[in-house]
Image (spheres, helix red, strand yellow):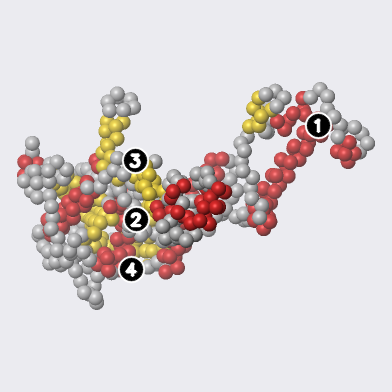
Amino acid sequence: MIRTIKPKNNRAKRALDKKESKLVENVKQALFIPGKTSNKLLHDAMVDLSALKKPDIKRFTKKNGILPFEDASQLEFFSEKNDCSLMVLATSSKKRKNNLTFVRTFGYKVYDMIELQIAENYKLLSDFRKQTFTLGAKPLFSFQGSAFDSHPVYQQIKSLFLDFFRGDVTDLQDVAGLQHVISLTIQGDFQDGDPLPNVLFRVYRLKTYRSEQGGKKLPRVELEESGPRFDFKIGRIHMPSPEMAKEAHKRAKQLEVKTVKNIERDSLGDKIGTIHVGKQDLGKLQTRKLKGLKSKFDQNGADSETENYINEDESYGEDFVTATDIEVAPPAKRSKKA
Amino acid sequence: MSSAAEKAKYLPVVVEKPIPVTFDLGNLAVFDSNTLDANELDSSNAQREQNIQSIVRDNVQLMINQILSLPLRTTTDSNGSSGQGSSMTLVQLPEPTSELPREKPLPKPKPPTKWELFAAKKGIKSKEKSGKMVFDEATGKWVPKWGFKGANKKLDDQWLVEVDESKNKKEGDELIDPRTLSRTERKMLIKKNELQHKRNLKENK
C-alpha cells in the first residue's frame, strides 16, 4: 500500500482524482518491466510491443528482481504507484527462456498472469521494412482457432490481448484509421491432453484496393506484414479467482441503456410518438338528439306510449349532452405525428 | 497504377468459410473457429507465413466488409486554419460484446449526510430550486439572494435600523449595532455549515 496523504494543493488533488475509479474507465495503461534476467531480445521485444500500445505505456529501464508467481506484491506496488493495470515483465532462465509475463491487475491487485515465451523464429519490428504505427490508432483483431472460444487458457489469452491493445472504446471510428491488424493464431487444432500449441502473434498492415467485384463500396483487402512477429509458447498461468472475476465484470447500472417506449424515429429522422388513448365505443356515440329518435318512440314498446307522452313535457328541449353522458371506453392505439 | 492494384482489381471481395466467423465490431475483432491444420502452421513448413497471412487476410476481408456495411457518417471540417475543408468518413460502431475486466472496482455511491438520513427518516423532500435571483420590490430589480450585493445584506447599508429587542438582550445590556449583528449571524451560519460538512466527511470515511 502506498501512504496516501491529504492533497495540499489543487494539482495534487486533481492527480489523485484521476487515479480514482471511474464509471467509464480510461484506457488501461501498460507498464513494461525488465526483470533481473532480462536480455537484449526481451528488451527489443518490449520496445516493439510498446510501439503497438503507445501512447498508453510506461517503460522501466532498470532491472527489477521480481518473481511474479512467488510474490506479486512488488508488481501490485508498481501497479498502484504508476496507475497501470497491465504489466509485462521480462525474465529469462534455463527453464523458461525469453519469457514475458503478462499481468493484469484489478484494483491494484493481481487479476491474472500468463507466461508467454518467445520461441525461436521471432522477427522484430526493425527486421521488417521500417514502418511506424500511427499513434493511438485502433487496431483490428483477428483470432484464428476454435480454442479461443472453448479452451480457458486461450480464452484468457484472447481477453488479455484484446484488453491490452484495443485502445480507446469509441462508437465512431475513422475509416482511414483502420491501418493495422493484430492477429493471433493457434498453431493447429489439438485434443485434450495434448500439450498446448503455440500462439502465433503477427501484425499486418492493411492495404485496400478498389475492386471491380466489390463495386464502389467494398474494397479488396491485402495484407503486408509489418512486425513484430512472435511465436508464444505458453508457460505458467494464474487464473483470476471467481470472486474477483465477478467483481471485475460488474457493469454499472447507470450506464445501462433504458428502453424508450412509444418514441421512434423514422428513416427521415422525424420523431414519431405513439399515444395510447381509450378505444371509442361507436355504439354509444351520441349524435344529434331528435325528438323522434327517443327510446320511448321505439316500435317494440308500443304499450307504454301514452304514459310516456305525458312525461314528454319535462324532457322537452334536452338537446345537449353533458360530460357524464359519455362513458369511458376501453383503450386503443392511435398514432400521431409529433 | 501499380501492378498490385491492377491485380487486386479482379480478385474477389467475398470469402466463403465452412464455419461462419463471428465478429465483435465494437472492438474491431473477428473470431474464426474453423479448423487449422497443424502441419501447415508448423515452424518447419516453408509456406507457413503465407498460410497464416492468407487466413488472416480472408478474415480481415470479412471484417472490412462488415465494418463498411455499418452506418457511415461523413463530417466536414470547414473551420480548419488552412481554409481547406477536410472531410472524414466515420463508421458508427456498435457496443463491444467481448466482456473484459474493469481496471478498478465500480465507484462507490456517495454516502448520505446526517441531514439526508434525517430527511429520509422523516420523509422530508428537498425544496425545489428556485434559482439564485430574487426580485427586489423596493428597487424593482432582480438581485442575488446572497453574495455580492445580495439580498441578505440589505440591513448592512441602511442609515436607520430597527433594534430587535429579543436579539439584543442575549448579548447583554450594552446596545450593539444591529448591522454588525446581522453580519455575525451570517458568518455564524457559514461556520455552522462548514462544521457540518466536515463532520459528515469524517463520519463517512
Residue occupying image coordinates x 41% and y 57%: A299
**Which secondary structure, mark 2?**
helix
Would you call the spot at circle 3 few (<14 residues within 10 Å), some (14-19), or many (20 or more)? few
Q: CA distance from mark 4 to mark 2?
A: 20 Å
Residue at the spot of label 3:
A270
Residue at the spot of label 4:
A236
> Of circles 2 and 3, which is in front?
3
Q: CA distance from mark 2 to mark 3?
A: 39 Å
**Which secondary structure, mark 4?**
strand
Upstream in the sequence, badge 2 or badge 3?
Answer: 2
Identify whether A226 is placed above or below B36: above
The answer to whether any part of residue A115 appears in the image is no
Assess whether mark 1 and mark 4 are in contact (beta carbons under 8 angstroms): no
Amino acid tagged 2: Asp
Q: CA distance from mark 3 to mark 4?
A: 57 Å
Q: Position of residue A250 (x, y in %)?
A: 44, 60
Q: Position of residue A51 (x, y in %)?
A: 30, 47
Assess whether mark 4 and mark 3 are in contact (beta carbons under 8 angstroms): no
> Of circles 2 and 1, which is in front?
1
The one nearer the camera, B151 or A132, is B151
Q: CA distance from mark 1 to mark 3?
A: 62 Å
Q: Chain of mark 3?
A: A
Amino acid tagged 4: Arg
Identify whether B26 is placed above or below A301: above
> Of circles 4 and 1, which is in front?
1
Residue at the spot of label 1:
B180
Q: CA distance from mark 2 to mark 1?
A: 63 Å
**Which secondary structure, mark 1?**
helix
Amino acid tagged 3: Asp
